[in-house]
Image: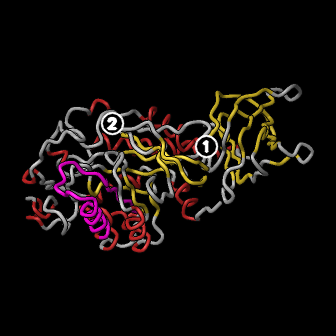
Amino acid sequence: MRIKERQLEFLDWELGVFFHFGIRPFYDGHQDWDMREMPLEAFNPVQLDCRQWISTAKEGGAKYAILVCKHHDGFANWPSAYTEYSVKNTPWKNGTGDVVKEFTDACREYGLKVGLYYSPAQFGSKLTSAKEYDDYFVNQITELLSNYGKIDYLWFDGCGSEGHEYDTVRIVGEIRRLQPEILIFNMWDPDVRWVGNEAGIAPMPNHNVVNALDFSVLTDEKVNLEEKLFLPAECDCRIRQDNWFYSDFDAETLKSVDELMGLYYYSVGRGANLLINIAPDRRGLLPEGDAQRFIEFGKEIQRIYAAKKAIFRDFKRDYVQNNTYYVEFPEITVVNHVILEESMHNAEQIEEFSVYAYPYPKGERILIYKGFTVGHKHICKFPNICTQRLEVVIEKEIAAHEMKNIEVLFA
């Protein structure tokens, strides 16, 4: 099975930030596919500062960021030559502005991987034939992949494309020609897959090798693949509960650090990436509360990982019972996390495992955690327990696994 090195690098990114921005915040209350017009004269984010967006993402520990370049309404956040419905015909900077350029420049300044979102589907399009629409699609994607340097990640949204026939060979061919190292999300020639919900939660087990893809929030039908592929999962969600784009009316739904940490355990802790949307407001800035909450969330993740330095001891493999790893502490120690990492160069092999603790120096071990796939990372979180010895037992595997790392911590 072919596994690209950049797919494994994607899993190392772990945490990303999504920025839904465009004309929608200037028409609060409009929804996807409501077919309501949003005239260009309203778009004027006079304080727009993508450096503020990306510095917030960086401080919160994100490794990558994604900008919505064109959503379902068709508004282009760059001066596209192929539509009049773009920043070039708005009051913002007298039509000379380019959100995509400011975003990509900021990502590179702060060292974040660059992701661009593009909705293939668009309501209200006047294009009447499939070829016309494909031409428009290819032309706009060519602008995005030609004019802004290296793009690491291209995020296609399947919503609205149910049943639509695209010239996928042509589209994918152009993308791969223009950016040979790019990762594509979920459609046509994917490197990464959508987890299947917008809640930020990966299922358990979470397999990286799959034979079908979830396509859109508008359908329960999966797209069957011709063969099994290695496709890591990404879990997207919102830092607020209700809207992808900024609204004046949902600030009270801002998720707490505790809730965000729960999503972290359910996504990164299950071997997937977590992509959190923070919506810039009409000023062109991240709302102060949203930005601060993301930073607080990042600091909590850092606090958890910092705890491992205090009690981590090298695991050893029991070569009598070859499926068992163990650690012994010099004295009784309180623990509540075990972090497992499997080598992924041959895809994940572990299908089921157990974690045991010995609560007394002499006595039987007690099961404290039962898990399934490990993959890139599995964070085992359990109530505090005092122990001098922990064991991880691989109960079931597809083929011989290779354990990359095991860490124990108390946080």
Indicate the position of residue 67 as horizontal and vertical percent values.
Answer: 32, 56
Q: Residue at x 80, y 35 (%)?
A: 388
Is residue 268 in the magenta section?
Answer: no
Indicate the position of residue 183 as horizontal and vertical percent values.
Answer: 47, 62
Above or below, comparing residue 90 to residue 358 in the picture: below
- Left or right relative to 43: residue 15: right
> Which element type, helix, strand or loop, lies under badge 1?
loop
Residue receiving disc 1: 307
Indicate the position of residue 70 as horizontal and vertical percent values.
Answer: 26, 55
Residue receiving disc 2: 240
Mark 2 closeness class: few <14, some 14–19, many ≥20 residues within 10 Å: many
Q: Residue at x 16, y 55 (%)?
A: 126
Q: Is residue 105 visible?
A: no
Amino acid carrying mark 2 in the image: Arg
The magenta span reads 114-142
- Mark 1 or 2, nearer chain start: 2
- Left or right relative to 190: residue 99: left
